[in-house]
Image: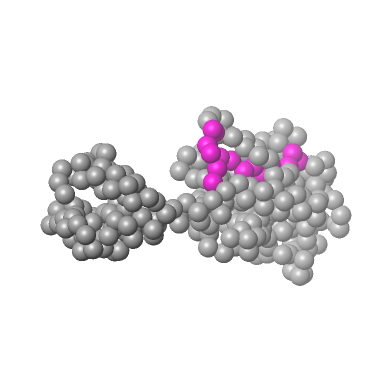
Amino acid sequence: MSDIELRHLITMAAVADEGSFGRAALRLGYTQSTVSQQIAALEKGVGGAVFDRPGGPKPVRITPLGVVVLAHGRDLLAKAQAMTAAVDRFKAGDGRVDIGTFQSVSNVILPLVIRALRDSHPGCDIRLFEEETDRPQVRDLDLMFFDGRVDGDVEHRKLLDDPYVLVARRGSFPDGPVHTAQLDGLPMVAHPPICDQARMEQALARRGVRPQVVCRTAGNETVLSMVRAGMGSAILPKLAVHGAELGSDASLCVHTLKPALPPREIFLLWQANRTHSPLAERAIEIAVDVAGRIGEDS
């Protein structure tokens, strides 16, 4: 059975449909001897005749064994055609891409990436997985956005530097930049000390600045709600503030910091030595372009 090839099954189906080797040859663009050779190879593979050949003008008749072989053969041919169509769609960029993300990227960068992918590949399948973690699991994903460099069997592409700003209730500080020394001992609403948050707090501590953290929460909107409520100020990456659209919020004020803290770095990660699908390649191109434009705006 291992000697049976799809071309043998295609020829058998043509003979069964046309009723003769000659008409099957015309349909397939073969010589009649080639059709005979392929049917003979098929019969050798299955161990018996698949057609009775009465000779003369009479049509060939499929044998009981041929009925079994043809039924399964048509199933195999249909699956092969479906696979060919799926491969063609994949090569055209209409496959599936799995992307890991985190909230500020989800709010600002990813909508633009997804819109551009959908515009160029309407049939593509995009799956998103959002997680805030110190240990990104890239292996099961095509791509992952992450705010930091990752060691190990991972490749990366830096997208942008995301500077930190201070968000405070309006009137808490004079307009303009705020010196980081002014934050020492003041109440602060903060993210959990994972990812780049821990690095940012360590940078403050090296300057002798230790705000009093009165609330930790993972949600950007919750951080801002607590600042509005008067719990304290917050140091946030500019991308998180960008996503919140604070320009129309009269209760809050955004200040730059001096001297500036080391910016959060946004990377796109993927498993090392992985061959990207055309859709993943396009997603990388779009993400780089989108991040570049956001960086210029910042």
- Residue 232 seen in the figure: no
User: Is residue 201 shown left or right of residue 298?
Assistant: left
Query: What is the number of callouts on the image?
Result: 0
The image quadrant of residue 267 is: top right
Which image quadrant: the N terminus? top left
Q: In the displayed orientation, state which residue is furthest to the top.
A: 152
The picture places residue 265, in percent across and down from the top left corner, at 68, 41
Residue 257 position, x and y percent, is 80, 47
Q: Is residue 269 magenta?
A: yes
Q: Residue at x 29, y 56 (%)?
A: 21
Judged left or right of residue 72, residue 240 is: right
**Residue at the image point whose x is 34% and y is 46% from the top:** 34
Colouring convention used in this rendered image of the protein: one colour
Residue placed most toward the observer, 106 or 285: 285
In the rendered image, which quarter is residue 264 located in? top right
Name the residue furthest left. 64
Q: Residue at x 37, y 50 (%)?
A: 31
Q: Is residue 181 left or right of residue 80?
A: right
Residue 170 visible within the image: yes
Magenta residues, as a range? Answer: 261-277
- Of the pair 165 and 116, the residue shown nearer to us: 116
Tell me the residue at 58%/60% (across/down). 121
Indicate the position of residue 135 as horizontal and vertical percent values. 51, 38
Between 46 and 248, which is closer to the camera in this rendering? 46
Q: Is residue 112 magenta?
A: no
Give the camera-side residue of 188 and 129: 129
Q: Is residue 105 above or below residue 119?
A: above
